[in-house]
Amino acid sequence: MKEARWQDWTNVLFGAWLLLAPFIGIGVSGDVAAINSYVIGALVVLFAFAAISHTDLWKEYSNLVLGLWLIIAPFVLGFATLIGPTYNQILMGLLISGVALAAVLQKTPTSGQGHGHHA
């Protein structure tokens, strides 16, 4: 196992929160907001665990993109009038993308070579 960064474990927790949020009253289980929360939460957990087991920048970039999606999803998917799910997904999107960006910045070689590929 490669050196796990705090960012990867943090995104595991954030992804797990997204998976559980509809069940604990942040939205209605089964609606579009909940489905988005389940799917994106599962993907965030998957990519974060993958980054823990083998560090590659594409996994961090994947969580960065997923976090950005969460920020715009309420407006694109039409659930922006649902205050709880909207605020939850925007907040989680900001946190997940911020943590992923921190991981990218930490993992990017300062020499400009490598970018997560192993020789």
Image (spheres, rainbow, N blue to C red):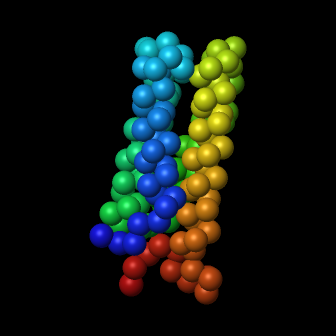
1 over 64 or under it: above or below: below
- Is residue 31 in sight in this rendering? no
Image height check: is 71 above or below 78?
below
From where the camera sits, is residue 95 visible?
yes
Q: Which residue is drawn at 57% across and 65% down?
A: 104
Q: Which of 110 and 8 is in front in this view?
A: 8
Q: In this view, does 72 lie above or below 98?
A: above
Specify the farthest residue to the front: 24
Q: Where is residue 1 in the image (x, y as percent from the top left)?
A: 30, 70
Name the residue at 44% across, 55% down.
9
Residue at 58 percent of width and 71 percent of height:
106
Q: Position of residue 6 (x, y in %)?
A: 49, 61
Residue closer to the observer: 46 or 78: 46
Residue 119 % position (x, y): 39, 84
| Position of 77 relative to 40 (above/below) | above
Tell me residue 36's x, y (percent): 50, 27
Question: Does residue 19 appear left or right of residue 65 in this picture?
Answer: left
Number of numbered callouts drawn: 0
Question: Residue at left 41%, top 66%?
Answer: 4
Q: Which residue lies furthest to the left in this view?
A: 1
